[in-house]
Amino acid sequence: MGSNPRDWIAASLLPAVGAIGLKRLAVAGISPSQLFLHDPEALRLVGARTATLRAMDSLDHSSGPLFDRLENCLAWLEDGDACCLTPDHVQYPALLLEIPDPPPLLFVRGDADCLAMPQLALVGSRHASRSGVANAYKFSAALSEAGMVVTSGLALGIDGAAHQGAVDRQGASIAVFGTGLDEVYPRRHASLAQRILDTGGAWVSEFLPGSRPLPGNFPKRNRIISGLCAGVLVIEAAPRSGSLITARMALEQGREVFAIPGSIQNPAAHGCHQLIREGAVLVETVAHVLEPLAALLGFYAAQSSSPVPAPVLPAAEAQLLEKMGYDIADIDQLVALTGLPTPELMPLLVSLELKGVIEPVPGGYLRCSADT
């Protein structure tokens, strides 16, 4: 199974040890328990200081704030579906061990077995357009039906839609937290997070229970999102965003990177276009994701569901949609393109929006993407 997670957690709390010190111990094949036995080599590897020794003494005497935090972590682990995986644990994800800086502690709630299943990360903007959210949901649902586990960060926007698409198909999904697993963040995704557990998925975090949602936690957790997966699909991302950080980490880790293109008028698509210019796989259908991964993972995942047919539109709406094209168009442009006065044009636009065919965006209206 692996060494006692209590020793790993206790060692991670020590000043001047942290993840780097634990990694040095793991590479040397030395258990963190040796620290508390004052093994000279273990102390040397972590660079133990006076503060480190004092903290160890405090833990030995079951006193002080570090001991209280250790006890809180151990109490959280007593929950039936909670565990802490260390690098020598049989369930520690093999792909994650391959990255340059695998987390020495991986807290899991839910079904830890799904961490060993083929995974694809879906990431993107927190401020996604309606079509971006729809793409995340549809691609996730189709990938889930094809046997992939959908992994993401539980954030608003693309992440949430990706998790939702998987759980709505009763598929396993993995949420990588930027907090401790005793706190769902953002709170509005509490019910979605519970559904992830109910459908055989898991929550994952390298942060100890009780860790707050600090801004620096979220870029740090991105390496875990990509590290767990065979590939990363980016759906709507600005040129400087956490999603692009995840994609670049995936490249560094030797993972496949996929990106969905968008309108050149949409700032949220510029990051995806940048990735495609740099060599990411341009994705228009689910098959564009499944085919490269099938060869990589040694299995064939067939596209399992037929596309949902587009709504049948009245002639006037169909003509307006054809005139719009696929770029953002404002009212004046649409009046010029169609020859219709604004009072006749507006009801058609409202009808198309209610049918989910177009969406209002800054600068006008945008045609929604076709089904996957």
Image: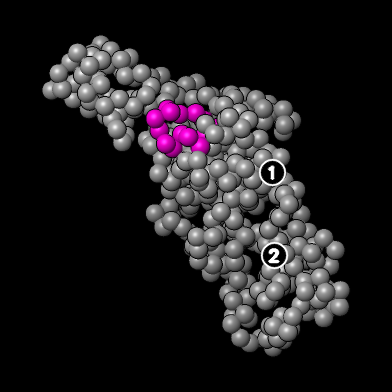
Which x, y percent locates residue 133?
Answer: 42, 37
**Secondary structure under the numbered disc 1 in the rendered image:** helix
Sort mark 1 into few (<14), some (14-19) or many (20+) by Cα contacts within 10 Å.
Answer: some
Q: Is residue 41 left or right of residue 368?
A: right
Depth check: 188 or 251 in front? 251
Sort mark 2 into few (<14), some (14-19) or many (20+) by Cα contacts within 10 Å.
Answer: many
Depth check: 351 or 246 in front? 246
Q: Is residue 8 left or right of residue 330?
A: right
Q: Is residue 359 visible?
A: yes
Tell me what residue is drawn at x 59 percent, y 50 percent. Answer: 222
Which x, y percent locates residue 201?
Answer: 57, 48
Tell me what residue is drawn at x 63 percent, y 81 percent. Answer: 67
Q: Is residue 192 above or below residue 270?
A: below
Residue at which label 1 appears: 252
Disc 2 marks a residue whose amino acid type is Ala
Q: Is residue 224 above or below residue 138?
A: below
Which x, y percent locates residue 248?
Answer: 62, 43
Residue 19, numbered circle:
2
Q: Is residue 7 above or below residue 124?
A: below
Classify the position of the N terminus by image quarter. Answer: bottom right
First to last magenta residue range: 258-272
Task: State the CA–CA distance, disc 1 to disc 2.
Answer: 20 Å
Q: Is residue 266 magenta?
A: yes
Depth check: 370 or 201 in front? 370
N-terminal of the two: label 1 or label 2?
A: 2
Disc 1 marks a residue whose amino acid type is Glu
Residue 340, numbered circle:
none
Tell me what residue is drawn at x 63 percent, y 30 percent. Answer: 279
Tell me what residue is drawn at x 82 percent, y 60 percent. Answer: 27
Mark 1–mark 2 CB contact (< 8 Å): no
Q: Quadrant of residue 304?
A: top right
Which x, y percent locates residue 333?
Answer: 25, 21
